[in-house]
Image (cartoon, helix red, strand yellow):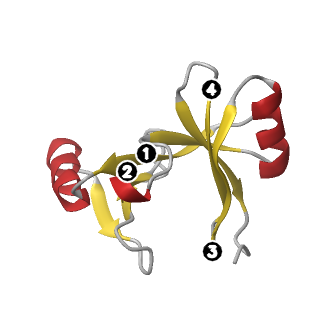
Amino acid sequence: MGRVAHFEIVASDPQQAATFYNGVFGWEIRPWDGHGEYLLVLTGEDDEVPGINGAIVHRSQSPAGSVNLVDVVSLDSAMVRVAENGGTIVHTRTTVPGVGYVAYCRDPEGNAFGLIERSPTAS
């Protein structure tokens, strides 16, 4: 079963968004080395209350807007299931080195979401 694994918040000014979310929630936000304006968001320690971490990304770098990414075993199979069930693929398979593979989709109502197949050897 796929679980929400990551979120992305899009912003025209990622630094301003980082300041806002840090001020409101106390989230630790830091650049992800070598990935432009992609800012990692740490919402808490893994041994605390359950939750997920995410990122703030520049609006121009997001194919789908603010999204939740769902863990899948096979990205290709999940994209087929999206299409079979009336959804659309907005942005197909992309490699995130050292993390895995992602794709962005919309459900039949037009809501955006992402898929992530984790693979630490992705390059």
Left or right for 34, reference 6? left
Mark number for residue 107?
A: 4
Q: Residue lying at the far top in this picture: please name it.
A: 109
Q: Which residue is mark 3?
A: 97
| Residue that appears at 16% across and 48% down | 20
Q: Is residue 98 above or below residue 19?
A: below
In terms of sequence position, does the residue under pointer 4 or pointer 3 come before the other?
Answer: 3
Task: Decide if residue 2 is in sight here.
Answer: yes
| Residue that appears at 62% across and 74% down | 97
Q: Position of residue 15 (x, y in %)?
A: 20, 61
Nearer-the-camera pick, 32 or 36:
36
**Contact (Cβ within 8 Å) of mark 1 with mark 4:** no
Q: Which mark's residue is nearer the viewer, 3 or 1?
A: 3
Q: Is residue 8 above or below residue 32?
A: above
Report, in whole angstroms, how far the alpha carbon at label 1 lies from the one at label 4. 32 Å
Report, in whole angstroms, how far the alpha carbon at label 3 lies from the one at label 1. 28 Å
Q: Secondary structure at mark 4?
A: loop
Q: Position of residue 35 (x, y in %)?
A: 44, 74
Q: Which mark's residue is nearer the viewer, 4 or 2?
A: 4
| Residue that appears at 41% across and 79% down | 33
Q: Which residue type does callout 3 highlight?
A: Pro
Q: Which residue type does callout 4 highlight?
A: Asp
Q: Secondary structure at mark 1?
A: loop
Q: Which residue is mark 2?
A: 44
Report, in whole angstroms, how far the alpha carbon at label 2 lies from the one at label 1. 7 Å
| Residue that appears at 52% across and 39% down | 68
Mark 2 residue crowding within 10 angstroms, few (<14) / some (14–19) / many (20+): some
